[in-house]
Amino acid sequence: MMLRRLLLSMSLLLGVGLFTPVTQPAQACPMCKIANEQDSLLPKAYMYSILFMMGMIFSLAGGVAFCVYSLSRKENAALEALGQYGGFTADANSLNLLPDGVSPATA
């Protein structure tokens, strides 16, 4: 089983490595090219504004993802506290997990 996973992952990595297209280096837009050719602080201003915009997007997306995750955990905890999860009660007898002829232990 472990060998099979290793072979599958190695073949996947090899396939991705061999069949990815070779890309050309990216060229800057005309404004960025002109700004980088000059000896001024304008290129740094562009860089900081781009980083700020990316930071805001990732912060908002991370906040939404965290809220969804925490709400999901709270809902699962509330369902487990009620003794129900997935529409079934939480005891083994109701899920038919016990072998035939075996009764559940009572305390």
Image: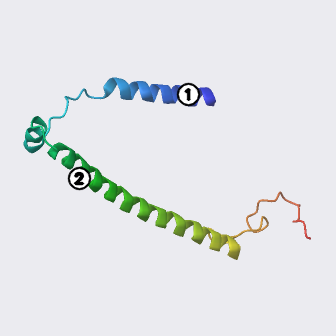
Identify the residue position indicated by label 1 in the image.
6
Q: Which amino acid does label 2 sit on?
A: Ser
Asked where in the image residue 81 lies, by quadrant, the reply is bottom right
Question: In the image shown, does 87 or 27 lie closer to the viewer?
Answer: 27
Mark 2 and mark 1 lie on one chain; the one further toward the N terminus is: 1
Query: Please, what secondary structure does the residue beneath circle 1 have?
Result: helix
Q: What element carries label 2?
A: helix
In the rendered image, which quarter contains the C terminus?
bottom right
Give the residue displayed 51% in from the left and 63% down from the top: 69
**Which residue is under mark 2?**
49
Q: Position of residue 105 (x, y in %)?
A: 90, 66
Foreground pick, 92 / 75: 75
Instruction: Look at label 1 and name its amino acid.
Output: Leu
Question: Of 29 and 70, which appears nearest the observer?
Answer: 29
Residues marked 2 and 1 touching at CB (< 8 Å): no
Q: Where is residue 54 in the image (x, y as percent from the top left)?
A: 30, 53
Which is in the foreground here, disc 2 or disc 1?
2
Q: Which residue lies furthest to the bottom in this view?
A: 82
Q: Where is residue 24 in the image (x, y as percent from the top left)?
A: 19, 28
